[in-house]
Image: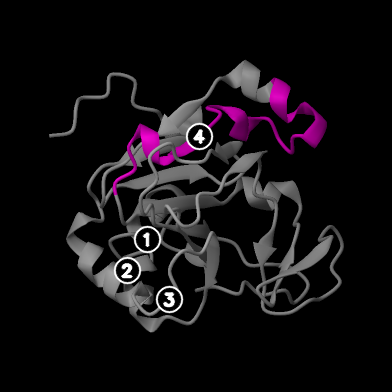
């Protein structure tokens, strides 16, 4: 049984909140949809898996978590499957997610620089666009404190684009929280929140499907790549 959390984070105040057990009923469907993907990938960008779409749509079990914040017009715009294991026990320093994935590269004022990740065009948009997005993390496996839960800096989503040189100071000011989870839990967080991930002290498979959601169209002919 899950212990009570007397300090459950608030999405508005902290930029993240836990939706316990929301995806439990669709875990088998989710695992089956992802079963053909190669294991032990630090971060595998996902597009074109038809079986995921009804789950991630705003009326779907997973998408409804994002739609409760962004409204029914939101859509999944990027998905990444993260995995940690005894084979691949990686870490990430404190950072903000600052890029989006689009169909093709077009020159639009305010968008740049450009990169390619797994062959997919990515670009840094104006910060206001990121501030209007949310991210869901669907846990396919349990993530106790010793298996590298996501770390967040509560409230850092309200501080705008944080220069790299100031990230450590902001994290000290905001403090940190470990987003532990059980299989079937969903963490919802504001896309610009500062977050990090350490190596696991007792590594086991820690698969997380991370999906970014947005409710607005892109300008200048840019199009979300989607899922």
Closest to the camera, between mark 4 and mark 2, is 4
- The percent coordinates of residue 16 (x first, y second) are 45, 36
Marks 3 and 1 in Cβ contact (< 8 Å): no
Marks 2 and 3 in Cβ contact (< 8 Å): no
Lower position in the chain sequence, tag 4 or tag 3: 3
Q: Is residue 78 visible?
A: no
Lower position in the chain sequence, tag 2 or tag 3: 3
Lower position in the chain sequence, tag 4 or tag 2: 2
Q: Is residue 72 visible?
A: yes
| Residue denoted by label 4 | 151
Marks 4 and 2 in Cβ contact (< 8 Å): no
User: Residue 131 lies in what quarter of the image?
Assistant: top right
- How many numbered circles does the render carry? 4
Mark 4 vs mark 3, CA separation in Å: 26 Å
Residue 63, numbered circle: 1
Mark 1 vs mark 4, CA separation in Å: 23 Å
Q: Residue sitting at 74 percent across and 38 percent down?
A: 161
Lower position in the chain sequence, tag 1 or tag 4: 1
Q: Residues within 10 Å of mark 1 (few under 14, many from 20)?
A: many
Mark 1 vs mark 2, CA separation in Å: 7 Å
| Residue denoted by label 3 | 37
User: Residue 101 lies in what quarter of the image?
Assistant: bottom right
Tag 4 secondary structure: strand
Q: Residues within 10 Å of mark 2 (few under 14, many from 20)?
A: some
Q: Please state if 167 lies on the left or on the right of 227 as rendered.
A: right
Closest to the camera, between mark 2 and mark 3, is 3
User: Residue 43 lies in what quarter of the image?
Assistant: bottom right
In the image, the segment drawn in magenta is 142-169
Q: Residue sitting at 86 percent across and 72 percent down?
A: 107
Mark 2 vs mark 3, CA separation in Å: 18 Å
């Amino acid at each position: 049984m899950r212990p009570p959390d007397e300090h459950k984070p608030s999405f508005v105040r902290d930029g993240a909140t836990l939706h316990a057990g929301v995806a439990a009923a669709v875990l088998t469907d989710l695992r089956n949809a992802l079963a053909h993907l190669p294991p032990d990938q630090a971060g595998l960008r996902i597009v074109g898996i038809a079986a995921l779409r009804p789950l991630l749509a705003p009326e779907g079990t997973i998408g409804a978590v994002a739609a409760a914040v962004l409204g029914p017009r939101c859509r999944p715009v990027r998905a990444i499957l993260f995995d940690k294991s005894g084979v691949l026990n990686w870490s990430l320093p404190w950072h903000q997610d600052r890029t989006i994935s689009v169909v093709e590269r077009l020159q639009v004022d305010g968008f740049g620089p450009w990169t390619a990740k797994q062959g997919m065009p990515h670009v840094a948009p104006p910060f206001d666009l990121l501030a209007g997005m949310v991210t869901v993390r669907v846990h396919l496996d349990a993530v106790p404190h010793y298996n590298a839960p996501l770390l967040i800096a509560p409230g850092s989503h309200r501080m705008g684009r944080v220069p790299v040189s100031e990230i450590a100071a902001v994290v000290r000011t905001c403090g940190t929280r470990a987003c532990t989870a059980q299989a079937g839990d969903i963490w919802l967080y504001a896309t610009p929140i500062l977050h990090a991930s350490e190596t696991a002290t007792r590594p086991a498979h820690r698969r997380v499907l991370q999906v970014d959601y947005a409710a607005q169209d892109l300008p200048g002919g840019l199009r979300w790549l989607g899922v």
